[in-house]
Amino acid sequence: MRDPGSSKQFRPWLLPKGADPCWPDPNLADADEGLVAVGGGLEPARLIFAYGAGIFPWFDDRSPILWWSPEPRAVLQLQNLHVSRSLRRCLQRESFLVSADRDFAGVIDGCADRVEGTWITQDMRSAYIALHDLGHAHSFEVYRDTELVGGLYGVQVGALFAAESMFHRATNASKVALVGAVSSLFSAGFTLFDVQFLTPHLASLGATLMPRRSYLQAATAAAAQTVPWAAVLDQLRAHFPSASRLDK
C-alpha cells in the first residue's frame, strides 16, 4: 500500500501552444474532476490524438483550453439504448427525415445556440469543422420537411465515436438523431459510443457509466480499428429509408 504521506497529488500538464501532441496517463488524473492538461491548441492532429487517448477538450471563452478524462465515463451501448413507446411511434411514423454529414456546420451551430450560453467557442467551431473537412468529425441531421430541427455531432477515431453535443428544435428530434447515430454506427462495426458525462436525459436513453480505466482500454482498442464511414451511411439508409430520400 502506498504511504499517503509520500504520495503526490496529480497536477495537470501545462501544454505549450504548438508543441507536439502528448499527454500524461489519464488514469492519474484526479477522480473528482478528471482534468488532464491545460493549454496547447486545437489543431486536428492534437484533437485526434486526444480522443484516441480518451481525452477531450471542454472550456469556455473565459478559460484556457482544458483537457478532460472523467472518472467514471459515460457511454451508450447498443443493447442499452432505450427507445420509449412515444419515440418508437415517432420513428414508425417517419415524422422526421434523417441524414448524416449533410450539414455539419448547421448542426454545430444548432448545438451552440443555447439561451444559457455555450462552451462551443468560435475556435472550437472552426476546429471541429476542420476535423469534419478531413473526415474525422461527423454529424447526424434530423429534418422536418426541409428544416433542420435536430442533430448531433462527434469525432471518429477508428471504431470509436465520441459524441460532443446534440440539439433539438422540435420534440424528439435530438432523440431521433441519437437513435440514428447509435444504430447505424454499431451496425457498421463501431465498438464504443462515448457521451462523456452522464446526465438524466442521457440516462433515460440508456447511457451508463464505465470505470475510466476500462473506458481507456476500450478506447485504445477501438482507435486501433478501421471502419469506413461509407459503411455507416449504408446502415443509416437501411435503418432510415428517409436518408435515401434526402439524397435525391
Image (spheres, rainbow, N blue to C red):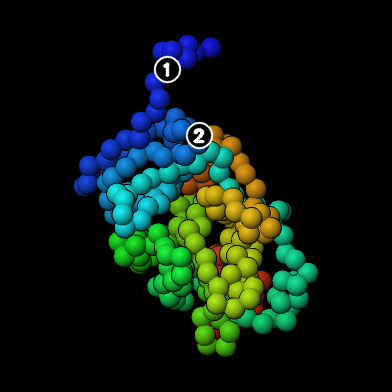
Label 2 CA crowd tier, 10 Å (few <14, some 14–19, many 20+): some
Residue 131 is tagged as: none
Reading the image, the residue beneath label 1 is 7
Three-letter code, disc 1: Ser
Left or right: where does residue 14 sit relative to residue 47?
left
Residue furthest to the right: 85
Which SS class for mark 1?
loop
Label 1 CA crowd tier, 10 Å (few <14, some 14–19, many 20+): few
Q: Position of residue 188 (x, y in %)?
A: 59, 60
Judge whether 69 appears above or below 28 on screen.
below
Left or right: where does residue 117 sit relative to residue 212?
left
Three-letter code, disc 2: Ala
Q: Earlier in the sequence, mark 1 or mark 2?
A: 1
Labels in figure, total: 2
Residue found 42% across the figure and 65% down from its top:
117
Q: CA distance from mark 1 to mark 2?
A: 15 Å
Judge whether 28 appears above or below 22 on screen.
above
Judge whether 162 appears above or below 5 on screen.
below
Residue found 52% across the figure and 87% down from its top:
146
- Asked whether the viewer can see residue 202, the reply is yes
Which SS class for mark 2?
loop
Left or right: where does residue 106 sit relative to residue 180?
left
Residue found 42% across the figure and 17% down from its top:
7
- Asked whether the viewer can see residue 230, the reply is no
Residue 31 is tagged as: 2
Q: Position of residue 90 (x, y in %)?
A: 71, 77
Comparing 22 with 186, the one in front is 22
Q: Position of residue 101 (x, y in %)?
A: 47, 72
Judge whether 42 appears above or below 94 on screen.
above
Contact (Cβ within 8 Å) of mark 1 with mark 2: no
Residue found 36% across the figure and 46% down from its top:
66
